[in-house]
Amino acid sequence: MAISLYDATVASFAQSLNAAVGFLDKGLAHFTANGVDLKEVVDTRLFPNMLPFTFQVLSIAHHTAGAVAGVRKGMFSPDATLPSLTYQDLQKVVADAAAEIAACTPDEINALEGKDVLFAFGEMKMPFTAEGFLLSFSLPNLHFHATTAYDILRIKGVPLGKRDYMGRPRLKA
């Protein structure tokens, strides 16, 4: 059985985005119930030289809906600025990305296979094909940043487990 670009990317992006929606919701419920300052949460870093929770959550959206938009345009160039967002703003960013990914069709995504995509960040330029970019750059970045966001919630005491991170698997119908 062949696997399509859509199955390998968009379906996986949707699973991870929906999981992030869930673990962010659990985080808000925990923080609200325990009187935790949400500003402190969005500024939390795992280590001083790592970017904060805000960046980790924004990167979940960048490497899913943003990656698909970049492939469509033929260029992915992330914004280097870190906006001041609330925890609820971050939840909306992820929910909006999930909605954008849900609107993608298999035909549309599969038609992008072989398309040239340039990753541009400052002076760095990296040429990819659509599938190379999505599978070898965005998908690993998605998992790195989703794991880091999840881990920050865990160190802040949110009662999350592996299933919260994994989301809903695609079971046989």
Image: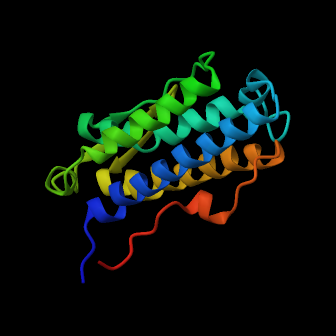
Q: Is residue 58 above or below residue 21?
A: above
In terms of depth relative to the viewer, which is nearer, 153 or 115? Answer: 153
Q: Is residue 84 above or below residue 91?
A: above
Colouring scheme applied when the structure was drawn: rainbow
In terms of depth relative to the viewer, which is nearer, 122 or 92? Answer: 92
Residue at 60% x, 64% y: name it.
163
142 relative position to 152: left or right: left
Q: State which quarter of the image contains the C terminus.
A: bottom left
Q: Position of residue 148 (x, y in %)?
A: 69, 47
Q: Position of residue 87 (x, y in %)?
A: 63, 27
In terms of depth relative to the viewer, which is nearer, 125 or 167? Answer: 167
Give the residue at the far bottom of this rendering. 1
Res. 124 visible in picture? no
Residue at 25% x, 67% y: name it.
4
Give the residue at the far front of this rendering. 33
Q: Position of residue 135 (x, y in %)?
A: 41, 58
Give the residue at the far top of this rendering. 84
24 relative position to 101: left or right: right
